[in-house]
Amino acid sequence: MHDIDEFLKKHHITEIEAIIPDMAGIARGKIIPRSKFESGESMRLPQAVMIQTVTGDYPEDGSLTGVTDPDMICVPDASTIRMIPWAVDPTAQVIHDCVHFDGTSVEISPRFVLRRVLDLYKAKGWKPVIAPELEFYLVDMNRDPDLPLQPPIGRTGRAETGRQAYSIEAVNEFDPLFEDIYEYCDVQELEVDTLIHEVGAAQMEINFMHGDPLKLADSVFLFKRTVREAALRHKMYATFMAKPMEGEPGSAMHMHQSLIDEETGRNIFTGTDGKPTSFFTSHIAGLQKYTPALMPIFAPYINSYRRLSRFMAAPINVAWGYDNRTVGFRIPHSGPAARRIENRIPGVDCNPYLAIAATLAAGYLGMTQKLDATEPLLSDGYELPYQLPRNLEEGLTLMSACEPIAEVLGEKFVKAYLALKETEYEAFFRVISSWERRHLLLHV
């Protein structure tokens, strides 16, 4: 706790937001006065927080966390303490890990699931490197959820009426917002890199510098909070829904991944001759084989599957190819030392801890099982058949039947995650949509 104590003194902190990421990647926790935080009294939360659905409900199976609804202890990770730049009074935020009273980890915690996968890599002497790219939309404030979203008004006083991919002027429309975002990220030491305008109307993308998977997951978790908060201060919303607007492309969280040999520091995807290794092709093969069963993590909501449609800048299969943006797994043009795989399938609505754990788990299984990848695709991947689940229900069925995924991510986690997603699906299924009322009410 010494590093935390020094931070609190240096920045004259008065309050601490003690937070954990839940299954949806939502920040849960408590706001604690500095005096209470420094007292050493541990923060406790019900374990059931981890299986709370995005609608605020819980699976009926009480055995997922214990039938007595027990607490868990939240332990601050000193490396994650940061200022909250938008707070009125000096306030810090600290991400916590979750443990039982005997000190063992809470196995359904998303942070633990990622650590579990990273430990498997470490046992092999491999160090994964991740670089996420986050797409998101800026939209006008929408107080009525029954109304479609609209692009916000920029500095010209007009909303975008067409697609402005890579337009500098379209980004400049929201310069005051992005100045705040970059300032907030700088204060929090979030290493964001490039900002671009994506294909959709007021759709943006920010890339992160490559680095340690857990650190990057923490950064993405905090970045989403940051962008939403900054947007509210400019009287607009920032949304990380996978498909927020009809007729516009969806938003992804593309993940570049590579592996370093911890002993030599070399990229094990590249041999001494500069050519791809068997690790490289087996890693791809693992992604190809296990991604369909991991779709409830990569595409966690009903809305997520609306993004994964043909000719809408999103993959529909598990093909791979060199510098091919129409497939699930793209190999960007690079030198041998920077050889990497870009997983283009996850939506930006995913939990970053779980999505990074899942993409690395698939690659790990491919390498340890010495799987063979297909030949790289040289043509348009959108012309091929669908190979990914078309809806959440199908994805849940595949995930529940995949024993290797349960072994790597943890059986307790998979059981709890499936129960949570099934509960969310049932809640959605009870809703009658405007489409049904429009087309069925008087016509069938």
Image (cartoon, grey):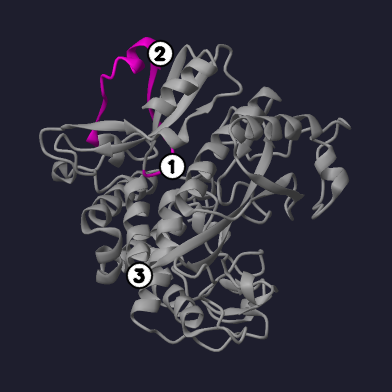
Residue 80 placement, left or right of 180: left
Q: Which stretch is magenta?
A: 23-47
In the rendered structure, does residue 30 fall within the stretch colored magenta? yes
**Residue tagged by mark 1?**
25
Q: Which callout, 1 or 2, points to the residue nearer the camera?
A: 2
**Residue tagged by mark 3?**
124
The x, y position of residue 75, in whole percent, is: 31, 32
The x, y position of residue 139, in whole percent, is: 68, 37
Q: Secondary structure at mark 3?
A: loop
Q: Is residue 45 visible?
A: yes
Q: Which quadrant of the view contains residue 335? A: bottom right
Residue that appears at 85% across and 34% down: 158
What amino acid is found at the position of numbered circle 2 in the picture?
Arg
Q: Residues within 10 Å of mark 3 (few under 14, many from 20)?
A: few
Q: Residues within 10 Å of mark 1 (few under 14, many from 20)?
A: many
Q: Is residue 252 visible?
A: no
What amino acid is found at the position of numbered circle 1 in the picture?
Gly
Q: Nearer the viewer, residue 269 or 353?
A: 269
- Above or below residue 114? Residue 320 is below
**Residue tagged by mark 2?**
34
